[in-house]
Amino acid sequence: MDKQFEQYFEQQGFKSQTAIQKAVYEPLKEDRSLMGLAPTGSGKTLAFVIPLLEKTAPSDGTQILVLAPSQELAVQTTDVFRQWGQVNQIKTTSLTGGANMQRQIERLKKHPEVVVGTPGRMLSLIHEGRLKLKDVQTVVVDEADELLKDETLDEVREIVMSAPVDVQLAFFSATQANTPEKLSQLFGVTVEQFDVRQTDTTQGEVIHGLVRVASNKKVTFLRRLAKLKHFQALVFFNHVSTLEHVAAELKHQHVSSVKLAGHQVQTERATAMRKFRKGEAKLLLTTEMAARGLDIADLPAVVNYDLPETATAYTHRTGRTGRMGRDGMVVNMGDDHDLRDLRKLVTEFTFKPLYLLHGQLTDQKEVLVESSKAADETKADLQEATSKVSTSQPVAAKQVKKASKSAFAGGKPKKKINRKKHSKKKGMRHKNIERFE
């Protein structure tokens, strides 16, 4: 690492490079095309930002192009480039759909050395002759498995073909959809692979939990989660229609939440992200669009309101928590059938049942064990008292009766119930575990 960047690296509180950062540093500096595979939250963005900035020359045209699958990820990557670009005076701008195109064109006239954006908007500006790629040295395809499929694959290939023939290509992702050989065929360059997913040690401990919840009780469960202290979560939905319905329900119940969906204008999406990052909202309701690359510092949890349909989607969703050594929790909601299918679909994680105990979401049952012990002790007292009666020792009848009641109430005497009056609250009134079924 260059001395200037090494000093800034240390100033930011980093002690050493992560596995992916070490693996691709030299190849990127040497203009080699590559595929970098690393777990979510392992520092992939800095893995290409630092080496590429080190070899970028100020005031020498647009030299780096970064493609991202969403506006949010493009803006986040832009911020990282701008922060680290201060070290050697490198300018960065973003080009995303939904934003004001005229303003983006004005920023391009200042000839930024780095351009980050979504493929669709970039391609439109290339066709109009606003974005010129004659000086581009490197094209980075972030979240490559997402971008290199369907229509976006054609857009990415067209963008790459608009760049110089000797352009360096760098593909990064947490999951692999294409082999290096397949990428070489698609783009006509030799692609090396650097896979550190098995050796990376940056991930914290993440609890993958299961909560049995009936469909008509899921909103109620979300509301109770939002009331927990220090709880905040990304909540994933498979369909926008479900997201909108739940958002309306939570708003009606005055639950602190915001939504992030593809049909929103950029200002609404940016506002939602800002509120959530600042902790002004407890829940961020979103779809698959937020599963890729978003880095939210110290995010406690991810909630799958709708369970993902593929194992890859599960990996990317849950990668939003437990990043860079921090602990996290994944809450998977569904009925018995849903949760059974999830276990079959995702085999790389160990799933545990979760409980709401005394205002906490946990996978532990210590409180239940302690309650059982207390009940056992009370029953033992009852047996001792009964034994004393049978041996004609002086024990008041009221004492035995009290002990009997206490044993069947878990150590606490039951309140007298007037059974002539109608009571809406039936069944077990004092239950430690919240159930939603």
Image (spheres, grey):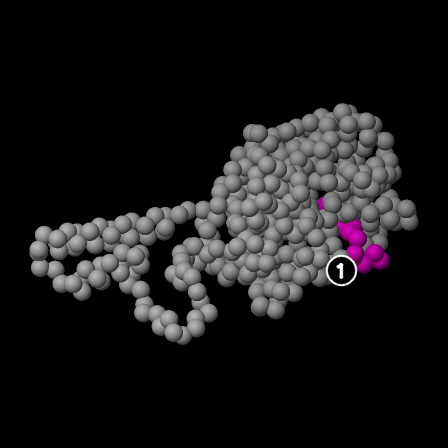
Q: Is residue 227 shown left or right of residue 120?
A: left
- Which residue lies at the image location 24% right of the left edge and 58% below the top edge? 404
Q: Any magenta on residue 272?
A: no
Question: Residue 125's x, y, as percent?
Answer: 86, 49
Question: Residue 160's x, y, as percent?
Answer: 83, 37
Label 1 crowding class (10 Å Cα cut-off): few <14, some 14-19, many 20+? Answer: few
**Based on the displayed image, in which of its 4 quarters is residue 432 positioned?**
bottom left
Question: Residue 45's x, y, as percent?
Answer: 65, 41
| Relative vertical location of residue 366 with respect to residue 163 in this rendering, above or below | below
Question: Residue 5's x, y, as percent?
Answer: 62, 40
Res. 329 in view: yes
**Based on the displayed image, in which of its 4 quarters is residue 148 positioned?**
top right
- Which residue lies at the image location 54% right of the left edge and 39% below the top edge? 203
Considering depth in this image, is 144 or 421 the residue closer to the camera?
A: 421
Considering depth in this image, is 99 or 175 the residue closer to the camera?
A: 175
Magenta residues span 90-103
The residue to which callout 1 is attached is 265
